[in-house]
Image (tube, rainbow, N blue to C red):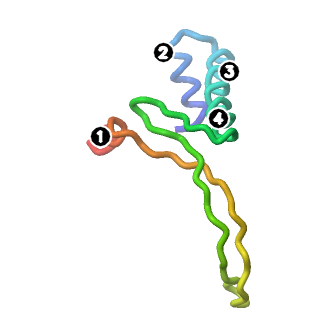
Amino acid sequence: MTKAEIVRLVKARTGLTRQQALNAVEIFLESIKDALKREERVCLVGLGTFFVRHRRKRKGRNPKTGELISVPEKKIPAFRAGREFRNVVKQ
């Protein structure tokens, strides 16, 4: 499912115009991104939780040369599905 398909569903279920539905979806997605940027958790009951995961600094190896390199620490977005959502997908 694409963002355009989600916009069509929001439009059909709410009676909003296409532009209003697009704005609503964009605001929703931007809200999640902004919260993750501030390293806040986004908990959506019935769906799951978006959060930021931290990866530690580590040593790696260049596969071409075999040389040891330092891989810097970084933050990555993560999602943990809630029980209700997992059960829906499982069926």
The numbered mark at residue 13 is 2
Q: Earlier in the sequence, mark 3 or mark 4?
A: 3
Read off the residue under disc 3: 23
Q: Label 3 vs label 4: CA separation?
A: 18 Å
Q: Amino acid at mark 3?
A: Asn
| Residue linked to disc 1 | 87
Query: Viewed as shown, does residue 78 lie left or right of 56?
Result: left
Q: Circle 1 — which element?
A: helix
Could you tell me the amino acid type at mark 4?
Ala
Residue 86 percent location from the top left of the image:
34, 42
Which residue does the image show at 52% across and 12% down from the upper left? Answer: 14
* Residue situated furthest top in the rendering: 15
**2 vs 4, front mark:** 4
Is tag 1's residue or tag 3's residue first in the polypeptide sequence? 3
The earlier-in-sequence mark between 2 and 4 is 2
Residue type (three-letter) at the residue carrying disc 2:
Arg
Q: Report helix, strand or loop for mark 2.
A: helix
Question: Which amino acid type is shown beneath numbered disc 1?
Answer: Asn
In front of the other: 52 or 19: 52
Q: Secondary structure at mark 3?
A: helix
Q: Are marks 3 and 4 in contact (CB under 8 Å)?
A: no
Q: Callout 4: few (<14), some (14-19), or many (20+) C-alpha neighbours within 10 Å?
A: some
Give the residue number, with chain letter if any, for mark 4: 35
